[in-house]
Image: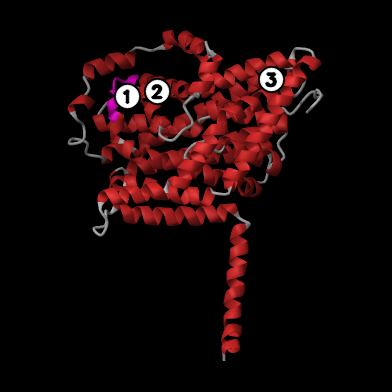
Amino acid sequence: MVEYGLDKLQPVKDLYTYLQRFVQKRLWLRVIIAMVAGILLGAYFATKPEWIEANTLESVVNWIAFPGNLFIRIVQMIMIPLMFSSVVQGIAGGGSADYLKKSGPKLLIYYMMTTTTVLILAVILASIMTPGDYMDAGNLITPDMAIDPEAANQTQSATSFGTIPNMIIDLLPANPLAALVSGDMLSIVIFAVIIGVSLANIPSDTAVPLLKVLYSVQEITMAITQWAMKIVPLAVFGLMCQVTSQVGIGTIMGLSMFMLTVIIGLFLVVIVYSCILLFVVRVNLKKFFIDARDTLLLAFSVASSAAVMPLTLKTAEEKMGIHPSVSRFIIPVGVSLNMDGTAVFQAIATLFIAQVYGLELDLATIMIIIITTILASIGTPSAPGAGVIVLGSVLGTIGIPMTAIALIIGVDRLLGMFRTSVNVMGDLVTCNVFNRFYNEVPEKTEQP
């Protein structure tokens, strides 16, 4: 009878073994399962169950989120060395600055074209859906959030083009070591570009020793990334549980129209990217999304494009066949410059808050918002919550105090997950474009 019972259970064991192997081989599936489980548990914790005290609940959530915060800290630790070494290798690895001279200006033009296109779509979308009209903010606008309409109009009529030269100068790090310590990503990228161009224009026997060191730095950081990837499902589960428990269902419902507008806007960006892949690069969309799904899901979970940069590089080179000279230049630069998802969020959020305040925006003011959003999105720190802080500079162009971001701060982390995935997708799309049309890499110097 016992043996008969075991025989009856054998199909169940076989099914369990099959499912276990199926899930273990598919990181994206494990991430989705962890994400759903984390959201469900976080939503339950957000209801503040009576059987557990508030302080105890906070401690439990912190322990659940521990693997996620550990993963983010590990990646932050290697992020700057990887970014610096990747940019320098991407430029100097070709043996000259020819690739940068040919592709650099085209890359900037490409970024400007895509960002401007998606911003125009975002402004049109926000003007049609008018999410601010669905929110009664009479009780939400505190005295420190109030505005003077006359002052707002004066601010809208005054452009800040005179500050652009100073903004450009500020991009150059006065102290490169200070930029490395503070984590100023855009300054680090610019410094790395300067070093890379310099190495590409000096004799090979002088440049190769430093390139060998940077190559070793790349290999070390990628090895650490491989270790960190082992805890990704636990990290995703913990982070999703923490975010959902903090945001709460009530806050999400209160800003549902704003969130819907932002998500639709980000979906329009995905459509633009898909059109570029389909009609310009002519790649198989299904294969692209299959190759990118692990990276995009992880980006969604950690809400930081810089945190997933090692995996983005690996995906581009190993799965999509992008030449390292292309990926190791474009992806680190894109982490700081290619922020279409963030730009769309900032534009829609600005119009949403203006609608809540009842401000009438003319075409000239909307153009100023678009220009300011482009400038603000450049160099936005690729860390959770950074986008909404930078939003304050955009709000200032229409006379709204920075304190007004309190209207949307409750759902920023959740929307940050969506826009981060779009930002990372944009980097992979850019790699495909430049690998297809501008992969004219000169003969390489001696490699380590």
* Numbered disc in front, either 3 or 2: 3
The image quadrant of residue 10 is bottom right
Residue type, mark 3 in image: Leu
Nearer to us in this view, 225 or 28: 225
Q: Looking at the figure, which quarter contains the N terminus? A: bottom right
Tally the marks: 3
What's under tag 2, amino acid-wise? Ile
Membership of 88 in magenta stretch: no
Quadrant into which the C terminus falls: top right
Residue at point 76%, 26% (across, down): 440
Tell me where residue 223 appears, x and y as whole percent. 65, 40
Label of residue 361 in the image: 1
Q: Amino acid at mark 1?
A: Leu
Left or right: 337 with respect to 265? right
Helix, strand or loop at disc 2? helix
Range covered by the magenta-colored residues: 395-404
Residue shown at the point (60%, 87%) measured from the top left: 3
Is there a contact, CB below 8 Å, between mark 1 and mark 2? yes
